[in-house]
Image (tube, rainbow, N blue to C red):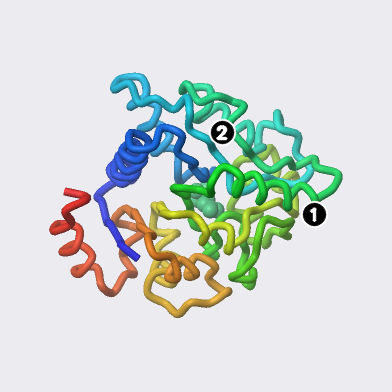
Amino acid sequence: MEVIVQPTPAEAARIAAMLIARAIERKPALVLGLATGGTPLHLYDELVRMHREEGLDLSRVRTFNLDEYLGLPPDHPASYRRFMKEHFFDRTNIDPRRTFVPDGLTQDIPRHCREYEELIESVGGIDIQILGIGSDGHIGFNEPTSSLASRTRDKMLTAQTRRDNARFFASPDDVPNSCLTMGIGTILDSRQCLLLAFGSHKADAVAAAVEGPVTSMIPASALQFHADAKVLVDEPAATKLKLRAYYDYAYRHSPVLQ
Ligand code: PGA
């Protein structure tokens, strides 16, 4: 994994946006895997700015979101379809017909999950997958002990995740207890992963994912098996990393990033 530490979330997000914009220039019909939550907001803001000020054209890009709450309609204020619409889709020239978010109201979960996987495969797979990390080490909603080979499926949320996400709901009791999520195997199939993590509350999870053993107890540690995973963090999220000096040296001398 390549770890890039930046002074602020905005600066880390600018690097991620630059990598995505370059990839879209090379391949206008790029397939992007998207994440929700507080973490990717700076990244979406930067991509929107690039679209408005620099002519970044997203019209042919396809997007697949990692996850969605089960039981929430797409227009629910806390649904991830609504989140994406407000923070990203409606602010760019992305074609809504090329955006995909798991359907939290599906009546046939196994079939919907199978079709989501097939759809990703039918467009040639995900080129760049954006990821956040939960304070419990989850990616997508793959909670600890998720199979490292898992595919898109329904998953029960941990109490910790429901507490962490309660801020997006009117009351903590409103947080659904289950979700649909791409699996860890689905995520590992993407060509590149960009994991973002900001704030001291992510420092333990980041250190365990990057420098700890690969274990389903820290689902993000599975990214150690990915051939092209970059981890972009701010200073507070980097405080528990042992090889910090090495990461900074590698970043300063990276021909791609400088
Ligand atoms: P956050 O969530 O961006 O809201 O911190 C990240 C995650 O749970 O993956």
* Left or right: 16, with 85 as reference point: left
- Separation of residues labelled 1 and 2 (CA atoms): 24 Å
Which tag, 1 or 2, sits closer to the chain's start?
2
Q: Residue 27, located in which quarter of the rendered image?
A: top left
- Which residue: 57% across, 74% down? 217
Disc 2 residue type? Answer: Met
User: Which residue is pictured at 49% across the width and 30% down the height?
Assistant: 88
Residue 205, image x, y percentages: 46, 66
Question: Dot 1: what SS?
Answer: helix
Give the quadrant of residue 182.
Answer: bottom right
Q: Position of residue 212 (x, y in %)?
A: 42, 77
22 over 199 or under it: above or below: above
SS under mark 2: helix
Disc 1 C-beta below 8 A from ligand 1: no
Whether residue 173 appears in this view of the structure is no
Q: Which residue is found at the position 40% from the left and 63% from the top?
A: 203
* Rendered residue at 45%/70% (across/down): 225
> Taking 94 as reference, is 179 above or below it?
below
The residue wearing badge 2 is 84
Hey, what amino acid is under mark 1? Pro
Mark 1 packing: few (<14 Cα in 10 Å), some, or many (20+)?
few
Q: Which residue is mark 1?
A: 110
Q: Nearer the viewer, residue 18 or 174?
A: 18
Q: Is residue 225 above or below residue 6?
A: below
